[in-house]
Image (cartoon, rainbow, N blue to C red):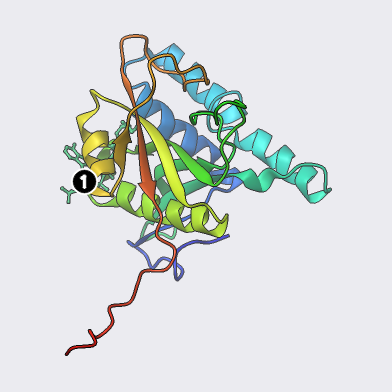
Amino acid sequence: MVLCQARAAPGASCVREARIQDAWQIADTHCSSFLPHQGAVMDFALRLDRWAGRGCCCLCLMHVCRTMALAGSLPFEHKKYLVAVEETLGGVQVVSGILTIDKVGDFLPRRRPSGCRRTGIAYVSNVAVRHEFRRRGIAKRLLTQSEQVARGWGCRSIALHCDACNGAAVALYKSQGYRRVPVPLNAKWPQPKAVASSTLLLMIKLLIKHPVPSHHSSNG
Ligand SMILES: CC(C)(COP(=O)(O)OP(=O)(O)OC[C@H]1O[C@@H](n2cnc3c(N)ncnc32)[C@H](O)[C@@H]1OP(=O)(O)O)[C@@H](O)C(=O)NCCC(=O)NCCS
């Protein structure tokens, strides 16, 4: 599924679903954004890990899952990997940003008292933009497209976790209408993997399905 309106012209960028051939660039974007200070060997190993599918960008696994889904055995449409790509003058597509969205509800507050997962709330993770492409509105565009995916799934809101100390990310999400929601201290549902010292904020944005048109008032 191509999410941008038209094919990107040279020098332009678009957001689309990830393809298997994007896997290495996604791994590279992921590692350089989230794990920037590794030694060369570790760095290469991490990229291989992300590429090969054991990390968050499990595109190879995705490929297998898609095949299975096509065979009718797995509802893989519960998760999508979006990439922002810039087209160079030579026609090469460079991945500049990544984002994952799912409607599995793993990391969302569970319903009480049943403890069941919530439905109707999409969850965004792994938002990252390569260093050289930052502050050009790429993360904003990825988030906008993720809303389109969430609406397509019939979700009423989107949630995400964000490290409270990550000023750029907090500013990004606030600017896009995400608001922090309090989490009970004794919350028992799984949390995303994070550095032990970090404080994760749960942020949610409500998706308004049909903006209310402004009507003329009856008195004038
Ligand atoms: C956070 C991140 C994804 C932002 O990507 P980006 O493409 O540079 O963001 P955008 O250009 O779309 O910025 C949109 C808005 O977010 C805010 N913002 C983004 N980066 C910011 C920064 N470094 N400082 C302050 N505000 C920032 C601004 O409000 C910005 O709007 P403006 O440029 O009109 O002021 C990027 O810095 C990144 O990849 N960081 C490393 C990975 C990471 O921390 N991911 C978030 C995980 S929760």
Q: Nearer the viewer, residue 91 or 163?
A: 163
Viewed as shown, does residue 210 lie left or right of 36?
A: right
Q: Quadrant of ligand 1?
A: top left
Quadrant of the rendered image containing residue 187: top left
Decide: is 153 above or below 123. Answer: below
Q: Nearer the viewer, residue 35 or 113?
A: 113
The furthest residue to the front: 219
- Residue occupied by mark 1: 135
Residue 125: where, in percent of width, then height? 44, 35
Residue 166: where, in percent of width, then height? 24, 27
Residue at point 31%, 44% (across, down): 178
Quadrant of the rendered image containing residue 201: top left
Decide: is 177 above or below 167. Answer: below
Residue at point 38%, 55% (across, down): 144
**Dot 1 beta carbon under 8 Å from ligand 1:** yes
Tag 1: amino acid: Arg
Quadrant of the rendered image containing residue 21: top right
Residue at point 65%, 48% (across, down): 77
